[in-house]
């Protein structure tokens, strides 16, 4: 039998429709399809990051149906049939089950890694080490999550509380903790027993499907017909056909709530790889790229600015004397705000709801 | 003989190539061709303001050759031959002489009013009253300037120091005063003896030409050939031809320095008509048009902004939580700065000098 990483099938979840990067992100081009950190999109970065341990023939991208064409265009090396479109949004649990079903068609005794498509990782080699470690634990039948070493008392993430160590960089999970208040978050960072839940799960495909059967039998039933499809049917597109017919009947629930929180035996592998969820325009200041602490991208003339996010895409941005300001300009829309108000971009998008051409 | 205002020929100087309204103003569309204050351009506003006392057949626009077509398009009611193009820039004294020469072809015993094309006047009727008063003084052979009642200790303008009163709202001019320092400007505002020089001159055409002959004989000589043209030659374009051949040989000097400062007998009519030279983006805050003291123009979504200048032209601007910030977005360029740095737009334009397509 092949080694655990040789049986690794990575399922990249690329269905997000995030609005927090408006006006760059749009319905037809959500965050994972933006090149925010390099010349590559976050999605392409995600695939490139794992390629040396999980080549394209063992990678899957599960995305929204409307994005399938864009994703395939982005990832010419990936077999077209490995880009699966969800006809409706049903949160992450159905995606988890689907990933397990598809992985079994790609590889006997597959181990799946469920990976978000829209994160950035500054140290990809460290990430691959953690993933390899997680595969080894998963091969023993455990469900493994990656936990990010927190760098600040973040109140916007869920945390994983660790129990005893079971080997290098690996712990049992005591419990998942919801987004804490600042006081709690500060304790977590100082205590060293809490890691950020990065939304990465590694598990044997058969173990995954058993867990779903235990906790979400309706989901198992809904996608049972797909499990009966042959590997050929993945390649020839008839599996996508079956998915289109069945997916709407899946319960809409996250894999965290629907499956993981009910599992007793979870493991967590520590990830210390300069991870970022690239959550808002402000988060890009963690990746500032000039000597005045600005994040600058595209066609920007910067004069005397500091701590600002300046993006010109298809249009020239001239920024003069700005402090802590975000300017994001595209060909049809421009957003300007104090960078500290990045969480409020949603209010802008909501206000534009009658102008579909801008969303 | 007709009354003075019936012999008034208004010559609108529309040659400015101002960069202070970049990115809205461009080489081919300077400030006077922008609709900053209403649905009309500042140039069209200027003509509309005088129309009831100086109809189109007695109005002239003297502009840069490259802008002639745009100006004619803007002003369909003006005879095309009344839009004159200066083949090269030679400051305002040649324009003054040219206006006098052309006025004599339009009207016997013409009185000319030299008017900047890029100012805004909030009370046009009051302006027309002042102009009428100035015409009456000019008809007596005086050179008359309009002086704006200062509303603040502005250090960016020249001032007119008044001498004794010679009638309602009319004084002799003691002298022109260069841009003062703040202390001096404060004294001027409080003292009531100093008015802003608005760059408007009213004078009989023959008096104007005599003054030029006295102080700038080289200019008289340079344009002598145009004086010899017949009125028909203004209409048929051959005067423009003669201008193209002669204009380059004109000395480049302002009418203020070249003529007015050497004249002993100047008169000043007081103008208190909500005048604005619309000098910078910041100056538009004097014309703020919403309840949070913002100046908003075009396609702008404003959320929680104050004291800001927000302009979206051919592109949607979303402004969130801004204070005292200017955002000016066009289809190919966006400027963002603290509104107090409006004087520094020139630095931006200078930095873009190698990108002619943006200027």
Image: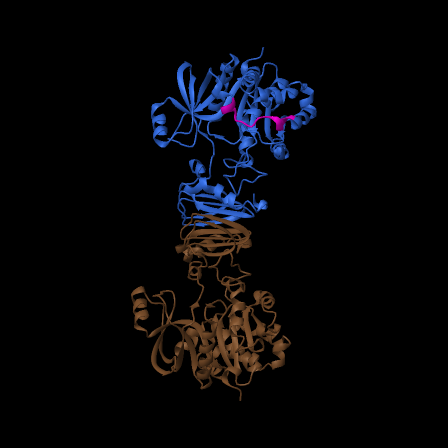
Chain colours: A brown, B blue
Q: In the displayed image of the protein, which residue is found farthest to the top?
A: B1
B132 lies above or below B298: above
| Residue drawn at the location 58% of the way across and 31% of the way down | B89
Between A224 and B270, the residue placed more toward the observer is B270
Q: Quadrant of residue B240?
A: top right
Return the x and y of residue B66 as percentages of the image width and height: 62, 35
Between A340 and B195, the residue placed more toward the observer is B195
Residue A251 in view (yes/no): no
Q: Which residues are magenta?
A: B246-258
Return the x and y of residue A34 as percentages of the image width and height: 52, 62
Does the segment drawn in magenta span residue A100? no
Return the x and y of residue A21 as percentages of the image width and height: 48, 59
| Residue drawn at the location 59% of the way across and 38% of the way down | B28
Return the x and y of residue A4 as percentages of the image width and height: 50, 84
Labels in figure, total: 0
Residue B68 in view (yes/no): yes
Q: Quadrant of residue B284?
A: top left
């Amino acid at each position: 039998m092949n080694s655990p990483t040789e049986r690794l099938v990575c399922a990249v979840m690329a269905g997000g429709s995030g609005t927090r990067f408006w006006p760059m992100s749009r319905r037809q081009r959500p965050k994972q399809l933006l090149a925010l950190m390099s010349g590559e999109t976050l999605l392409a970065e995600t695939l490139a990051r794992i390629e040396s341990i999980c080549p394209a023939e063992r990678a899957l991208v599960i995305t929204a149906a409307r994005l399938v064409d864009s994703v395939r265009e982005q990832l010419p090396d990936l077999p077209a049939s490995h880009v699966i479109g969800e006809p409706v949004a049903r949160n992450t649990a159905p995606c988890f089950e689907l990933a397990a079903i598809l992985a079994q068609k790609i590889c006997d005794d597959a181990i799946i890694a469920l990976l978000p498509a829209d994160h950035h990782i500054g140290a990809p080699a460290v990430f691959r080490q953690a993933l390899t470690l997680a595969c080894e634990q998963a091969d023993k039948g455990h469900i493994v999550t990656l936990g990010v070493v927190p760098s600040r008392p973040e109140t916007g993430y869920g945390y994983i509380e660790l129990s005893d160590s079971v080997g290098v960089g690996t712990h049992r999970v005591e419990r998942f903790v919801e987004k804490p208040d600042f006081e709690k978050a500060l304790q977590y960072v100082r205590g060293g027993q809490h890691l950020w839940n990065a939304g990465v799960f590694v598990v044997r495909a058969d173990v995954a499907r058993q867990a779903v059967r235990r906790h979400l039998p309706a989901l198992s039933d809904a996608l049972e017909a797909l499990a009966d499809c042959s590997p050929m049917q993945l390649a020839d597109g008839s599996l996508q056909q079956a998915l289109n017919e069945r997916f709407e009947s899946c319960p809409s629930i996250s894999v965290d709530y629907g499956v993981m929180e009910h599992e007793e035996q979870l493991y967590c592998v520590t990830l210390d790889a300069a991870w970022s969820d690239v959550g808002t325009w402000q988060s890009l200041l963690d990746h500032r790229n000039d000597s005045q602490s600005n994040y600058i991208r595209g066609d920007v003339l910067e004069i005397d600015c500091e701590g600002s996010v300046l993006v010109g895409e298809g249009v020239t941005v001239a920024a003069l004397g700005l402090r802590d300001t975000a300017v994001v300009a595209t060909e049809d829309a421009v957003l300007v705000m104090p960078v500290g108000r990045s969480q409020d971009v949603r209010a802008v998008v909501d206000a534009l709801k009658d102008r579909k051409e801008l969303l």
